[in-house]
Image (tube, rainbow, N blue to C red):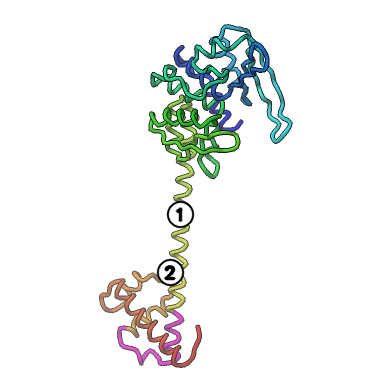
Amino acid sequence: MSFAAQTKKELTQVAAKPCCDRAELTAFVQHGGRLNSDIEPPVLELATENAATARRMYTLLKTGSGHPLEVLVQRKMRLKKNNVYIVRMRHDPRGMLSNLGVWTEDGNIGGQIPPDTVALPCCKKAYMRGAFLASGSVNDPDSHSYHLELTNRTAEHATALLGILRAFRLHAKMIERKKGFIVYIKEGDKIIEFLGVIGAHKALLHFEEVRIVKGMRNQVNRLVNCETANLNKTILAAVRQLDNIRLLEQEVGFSGLPPKLREVAEKRLQHPDVTLQELCALLSDRVSKSGINHRLRKLDELAQKIRAERGITD
């Protein structure tokens, strides 16, 4: 079972007050509902690909309408060929839709979220929960990117949903796609907050755990890469130092070098594997690491001068 499916299954088990059930049912109708007005009376259908969500839709619609319902199962013939669960209400739904505040004069389900339905903070949370169950999805935290989205039919409804999310400081964004208007969240922190607000606490803990492990793994990889780069840089520098010293010994001899440079060259040649700090301890005079670096740069300059004068290539 995918992370999104597990999250939705958890959300269908959340116990809520009657006012919150009303808000969640309203979200189901506006996000997953379809009104067939070609026949009389019209038929209301709530569709979803998630079996647990279908059971939740059936329960809330049965309680909200008080009328018998049908449950149909259809199989998609394209792509993943998932089952589609349809909760159908054959009794005239216009009275119930008017009561929910989503019935419009032109006979459609309204795009504006009824203000009375989401007047309380708990009802706002319930509406967000219903919207996610009906038309939401969230990437597995183990995937390459974090992404949570809610699909809306109209820009009006998407804008209203953005207002509800922002009431909880969930800074979502909106984009238009072929299937409608998408309200989405990309930040891992905000996705975790969203899951907490709608009541998916187990999913929240799992998401946070995976995110922490990924963060630690990425940090370790960065440190290892940094250490490897530093080690390679140190090795290349040591090889260059030895090449310079051997060239100077061959072309001018150590006797032609100043005493301090001669001592550094001899010690480095005798101890090619020691660090600069360890090389400092081998010298007769007290010298710092920066002092050693300065002398090695002088040797490099002398070696480069000899290479230029005699046409020696590296």
- Type of amino acid under label 1: Arg
Across and down, in percent, residue 299 comes to: 37, 83
Under tag 2, what secondary structure? helix
Residue at point 60%, 17% (across, down): 55
For discs 2 and 1, the disc positioned in front in the rendered view: 1
As for residue 256 lying within the magenta part, the answer is: yes
Magenta stretch encompasses residue 44? no
How crowded pointer 1 is (Cα within 10 Å; few <14, some 14-19, many 20+) is rated as few
Note whether 314 is above or below 134 in the view shown.
below
Range of magenta residues: 242-260
Q: Sequence order check: which comes first, mark 2 or mark 1?
A: 1
In the picture, measured across the screen, residue 22 lies left or right of residue 69, that is: left
Q: In the rendered image, is residue 28 in sight?
A: no
Foreground residue, 295 or 102? 102
Residue at the image position 50 percent from the left and 14 percent from the top: 100
Q: Which residue is mark 2?
A: 234
**Mark count:** 2
Label 1 residue SS: helix
Q: In the depicted view, which residue is nearer to us: 189 or 137?
A: 137
Q: What residue would you read off at disc 1?
A: 222
Residue 159 in view, yes or no: yes
Position above or below: 195 against 284: above
Q: Which mark is residue 45?
A: none
